[in-house]
Image: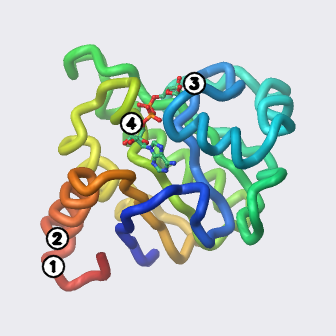
Amino acid sequence: MATIEVVLGDITRQDVDAIVTAANESLLGGGGVDGAIHRAAGPRLAQAGSAIAPCDPGDAKATQAFDLDPPVRHVIHTVGPVWEGGAYGEAEVLASCYRRSLQVADELRARTVAFPAIATGVYGFPPGEAARIAVSTVRRTPTAVTTIRLVAFDEATHELYTAALHDEIGGDGPC
Ligand code: AR6
């Protein structure tokens, strides 16, 4: 079973095989975490993204990591749900983002993967529910990934992840 870590920080600075970006269907880049990753990876990331676009909500597709510092070798682009009140399958689409990203990581033979809090920024998904979905989905998805790092960009998200992990595994795991 993979180790689930919760950290506070910038996903572009993580020491992992692959980082996940919260993209939009064009895979051309945008704001938020996607903008930060595109700035760090350089313009070839948008070129590579557009070549494999579109990416449906809940799906994930990989490119090289270009100018991102090693050991990051891959960017996994996933598209979260736009929050429309919760009655439009948003939770299932968000869970699918985490599942599909881990499946793609397995295809790439990535062993360490970092995730941002997908859909909790511009797309407006409530952060507490998103944290619970992230933790429970990565914990239940069969994968050869050994370390799954949930990267919180702010203290509030870090606390939500820590609480969700505590609820999930009873408080004895790493966080
Ligand atoms: N490292 C880690 N997390 C970050 C970073 C960072 N450097 N920067 C922001 N976050 P968002 P979404 C957090 O809006 O809601 C883009 O334009 C942020 O605090 O980036 O899925 C895409 O192209 C928040 O908790 O993604 C799409 O059009 C989380 O990342 C759209 O936004 C996600 O916020 C996707 O919206």
Badge 3: residue crowd in 10 Å (few <14, some 14–19, many ≥20): many
State whether label 3 is within 8 Å of ligand 1: yes
Query: Marks 4 and 2: CB-CB under 8 Å?
Result: no
**Mark 1 packing: few (<14 Cα in 10 Å), some, or many (20+)?**
few
Q: CA distance from mark 1 to mark 2?
A: 4 Å
Task: Tell me whether the residue at label 1 lies in contact with that at label 4, contact meaning CB atoms closer than 8 angstroms.
Answer: no
- In the drawing, what numbered circle is on residue 171? 1
Q: Earlier in the sequence, mark 1 or mark 4?
A: 4
Q: Which residue is mark 3?
A: 24
Mark 3 / mark 2, whichever is N-terminal = 3
Residue nearer the viewer, 162 or 110: 162
The residue that disc 2 covers is 166
Of label 1 and label 2, which has the lower sequence position? 2
Q: Which residue is mark 4?
A: 94
Q: CA distance from mark 1 to mark 4?
A: 24 Å
Please state if 40 lies on the left or on the right of 58 as rendered. right
Q: Secondary structure at mark 1?
A: loop
* Residue 5 in which image quadrant: bottom left
N-term-proximal mark, 3 vs 4? 3
Q: Is mark 2 within 8 Å of ligand 1?
A: no
- Left or right of 134: which side holds 143? right
Q: Earlier in the sequence, mark 3 or mark 1?
A: 3
- Neighbour class for label 2 at 10 Å: few (<14), some, many (≥20)? some
Q: Give SS at disc 4.
A: helix
